[in-house]
Image (cartoon, rainbow, N blue to C red):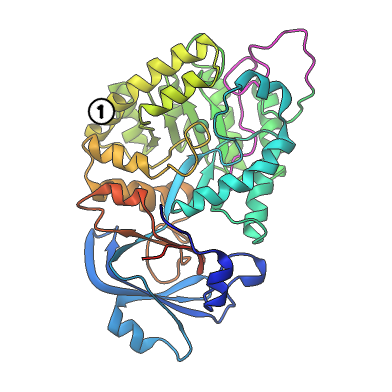
Amino acid sequence: MKATFPLLVLAALGLPTLGRADAPAAAAVTVVRAARLLDVASGELRRDQAVLVRGERIAEVGPAAEIAAHAPAGAISIDLGDVTLLPGLIDVHTHVAMGDLSKHRDRDRLRLDAIDAAVRANVYARRTLEAGITSVRDLGTADYVDVALAAAIDEGVVVGPRMQPASLGVGATGGHFDPTSGLSAHLAIVNEASGIADGVDKIRELIRTEVKHGAQVIKMAATAGVLSEEEAVGAPQYSQEEMNAIVEEAHRWGRKVAAHAHGAEGIRMATRAGVASIEHGTFIDDEGLKLMKERGTYLVPQVFSPEVLHQFEQAGMPDVVLKKARAAFAAQLDGFKRALKSGVKIAFGTDAGVYPHGENPRQLTRMVNAGMAPLEALRLATVNAADLLGWSDRVGALKPGLYADLIAVPGNPLDDMTVVEHVRFVMKGGAVVRRDAP
Ligand SMILES: [Zn+2]
């Protein structure tokens, strides 16, 4: 077990820490030094490097001796020793405000609501950040809990990753996002904020409402899903006309669209509509891969470990969900390998919330085990992810001008990707979030 330095200790050491009172002053200068630094863009692993951080941004990156000479007197020095510095990782598919799977799914559906989610969300946000995930695109949460969480994090009230929230999502009646699907038709549940709309006019109204309340990206349920109770896992749930309207309306407001899509037909329809990314893409076919490549559409696949299916089985899921989960999870690796071969653009998204919070980096190891080059895997979670978020000018690399979001891992991830599962140091926006004893 690794001990994380409590923030009080960091403060006592004079290190900047997260939290409103302790946020780094604009003039604060910190030098972070390590035995190695990986430039994920070029693939170059450089020895004895340092990052000069001014306030919340990176000012300079280079050989440690050179950076030390440039640092002003009084700069805080953090020597991390035998570790590799990387840019903070970005997960483009999370549900930070959604709890880990409980053992009583149906009871929870009836007894827990947005207030419960909000009370718990900060725990998952911190867990995510401490695992080295410094930015997320958060794809769908009822009742705008994600928007509130993102705002609280930005204000420094809650410790968590930078968030690009999708708010409610946009889905069809009885489809993947319908919270009352599977429940009695006689149950009257008051849920105005659940992200359901049918037909072009209602869809436009819902997107405008979501943008009004803080959606920075629009999430569409293009096809059926695993956790919902439709029979199919991949059937389209919107017409082509409706998908086109979703993308057109989102673009009008300057928002990209992320499409939840498992089945081959729905993947093609969403891609034709012009979405920025296909989420899951579990049963993608060659035609879909070809179309996505032509259009420059990102694929955001998951590669769960087998334990995730076991957690589903333990969670009291209805048989219809378990049946779909078995089929979908079994197809993940094959879909990922075919995507890899096709040369389609891929970004790293774990579906944390459905998958355990804080275990996000483990899917990078799974991707490498499935045949992806380690450097390529790290790019999915840095440069590619930043590009998909439209945040390349903020995060995703260690270079001057970007936020000082950096992590350190033991060993060399190019030789052994499992080191990303053991993050030792996390800095977000120039503030130390985690520093394990060496
Ligand atoms: Zn998801």
Assign the C terminus to one quadrant of the image.
bottom left
Residue 322 shows up from this direction: yes
Whether the magenta-drawn stretch holds residue 186 is answered as yes
Please provide percent x and percent y for residue 107. 67, 20
For label 1, the SS is helix
**What span is in magenta?**
163-189
- Find disc 1 in the rendering and name its residue: 338
Q: Position of residue 55 (x, y in %)?
A: 53, 75
Query: 10 Å neighbourhood of mark 1: few (<14), some, or many (≥20)?
Result: some
| Residue at x-position 27% and y-position 48% | 417
Q: Is residue 346 visible?
A: no
Report which quarter residue 50 is drawn in.
Answer: bottom left
Residue toward you, 406 or 300: 406
Of 55 and 298, the residue lying toward us: 55
* Residue 185 in the image: above or below residue 145: above
Q: Residue at x 46, y 85 (%)?
A: 75
- Overall secondary structure of the magenta section: loop
Which amino acid lies under the numbered mark 1 shown in the image of this protein?
A: Arg
367 inside magenta stretch: no
Q: Identify the residue shown where x is 41% and y is 56%.
A: 2
Quarter location, residue 308 = top left
Of residues 293 and 339, the one nearer the viewer is 339
- Residue 294 location (% of width, % of height): 32, 34
Instruction: List x then y, in percent, for residue 144.
Output: 69, 39
User: Horizontally, is 231 left or right of 145 in the view?
Assistant: left
